[in-house]
Amino acid sequence: MSEENSQKIKKPWPTKKAMEQIYDRNLWGNNDAEFYSGFGSHSPELVNPYIEKVQSFLTSFDEFLTVCDLGCGDFNIGNQLVKYTQKYIAVDIVPELIKYNKSKFMADNLEFKCLDVSKDNLPKVDCVIIRQVLQHLSNAEVQRILHKLVNFKYIIITEHIPKGDFIANKDIISGQGIRLKKNSGLDILKHPFCFEVKDKKQLLCVDLENEKGVVVSWLLEVF
């Protein structure tokens, strides 16, 4: 193989392999499900109020927004939001998961794409939803994604963070775990990211009684 041809071949990023392994081995639970995105995507105490808050935002406009769901997972949550959008593009890094979602969820305004959001071009939409995704990624990978998010007017971001005071954004290796084990959590507005926004509003904060930390959702207006 020539050097020119070898450079054209895209090698998979470690994150892709890590996420594929999570679903292959059901590392987030529920061995009965073909694909399962974990407690955070299925617990009624987290899902129900989240759907209510996001629905309220999406229906507050005269015309529905176009939305891109980055890290859509098994689509248990996104499936409940599609009808409140003009166009809903659901993205995930795992090819078999996207293939499965395409066969299970169908709507005229729904589209699934298999993308690595840290390196691939993202669809042009009004609003990005990124729910408990960045918390699994290294700081370097988060930074690559944030460089792309400046192009979207609205961002709805959800993170699982410690209760009370903590040092934000301790680095981790991308994969199954999150910063909670280091008594840290992701906050893109703080160092080293310092993501700039026009406005921010806390949509929801759920205290996990039987788990460490809280799950917080923010609405960020970028421009």
Image: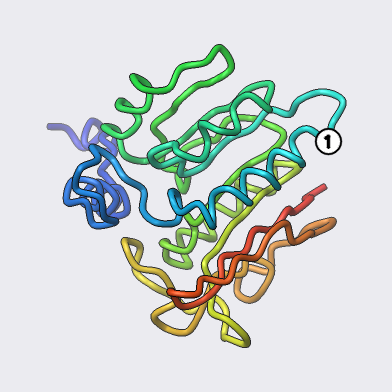
Is 17 located above or below residue 93 in the figure? below
Which residue is nearer to you in this view: 63 or 113?
63
Q: Residue furthest top?
A: 108
Residue 154, percent from left and from top: 73, 44
Residue at disc 1, secondary structure: loop
Q: Please state which amino acid type lies under the numbered disc 1.
A: Ser
Q: Which residue is mark 1?
A: 60
Q: Is 101 left, or right, of 24 in this rendering?
A: right
Up/down of 117 relative to 84, above or below: below
Name the colouring of the figure.
rainbow
Q: Residue at 37% x, 27% y: name it.
A: 101
Where is residue 69 drawn, in percent x and y?
54, 38
Tell whether 172 sits left or right of 207.
Answer: left
Which quadrant, please, contains the N terminus? top left
| Place of residue 206 in the rendered image (x, y in percent of width and height, measured from the top left) | 60, 65
Closer to us: 84 or 93: 84
| Residue at left offset 62%, top offset 50% | 50
Q: Which residue of the protein is positioned furthest toward the left in this rendering?
A: 1
Residue drawn at x 46%, y 48% is: 118
Quarter residue 164 falls in: bottom right
Farthest residue to the right: give it: 62
> Crowding at label 1, few (<14), some or many (≥20) Cα neighbours within 10 Å?
few
Question: Residue 9, located in which quarter of the rendered image?
Answer: top left
Name the side, left or right, on which 141 lies relative to 143.
left
Question: Along the line of sight, which residue is nearer the eye, 33 or 141?
Answer: 33
Residue at left offset 50%, top offset 74%: 209
Q: How many marks?
A: 1
